[in-house]
Amino acid sequence: MYRFLLTAFLLSAHGVFGQTVLDATRRCWSGGIAGRHGCDYTFSILFKPAGASIVPEKIWVDGQEVPLLLKAENGMQANVSLSRSARGLQLDIAVGSQFDDGNMYTPASDRPKTKSLRKHAGVALLAYKFNGKMKYFTVKKIMVEHPPVSYP
């Protein structure tokens, strides 16, 4: 009983660190250059407590590693925003995957190799730093699936 009370006191004094997915959407698309297809994703994740120090690093969607940028750099647009409120620190992410099946007839040994990912059972894997230590969070499911779009 003493341990339980001590744990409850420590957690209430320092705040419980946790994550909640507020929103997760996906819209898949195809078209343009022959064989090109992919999906666009948006994720909103709430980190608690509000004073948490989070540095987003990268995210993996559809087997592709996507860097997360808080500000535009090297000709790439920012794809992450952070906002702090009494509820916590909200991380909003907008990323996409794209594939070009133009090389679908190339022998497998000649195709580009992809980095192996940390195993996860979900839609996306977020890598971030919390107090200087690398952490991972899995977005397990899509909350809103938009109808696919086909371009000519």
Image (spheres, helix red, strand yellow):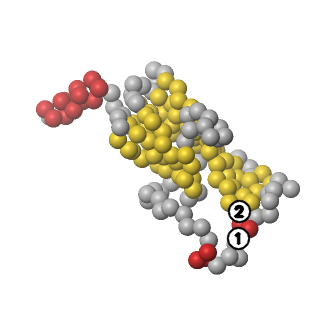
Q: Is residue 152 left or right of residue 81?
A: right
x 49%, y 24%: residue: 84
- Residue 145 visible, this orientation: no
Which disc number belongs to residue 31? Answer: none
* In the depicted structure, whether residue 140 falls above or below residue 87: below
Give coordinates of residue 82: x percent, y percent: 53, 29
Distance between the Cα atoms at labels 2 and 1?
7 Å
- Of 39 and 104, the residue lying toward us: 104
Task: Find out whether the residues at labels 2 and 1 contact each other: C-beta distance under 8 Å.
Answer: yes
Give coordinates of residue 53: x percent, y percent: 40, 30
Which disc number belongs to residue 103? Answer: 1
Task: Name the residue that disc number 2 marks.
Answer: 100
- Residue 99 visible, this orientation: yes
x 21%, y 32%: residue: 7
Name which residue type carries label 2: Asp
Name which residue type carries label 1: Asn
What is the quadrant of residue 13 in the picture?
Answer: top left
Quadrant (top left/top right/bottom left/bottom right) for the C terminus: bottom right
Give coordinates of residue 51: x percent, y percent: 39, 25
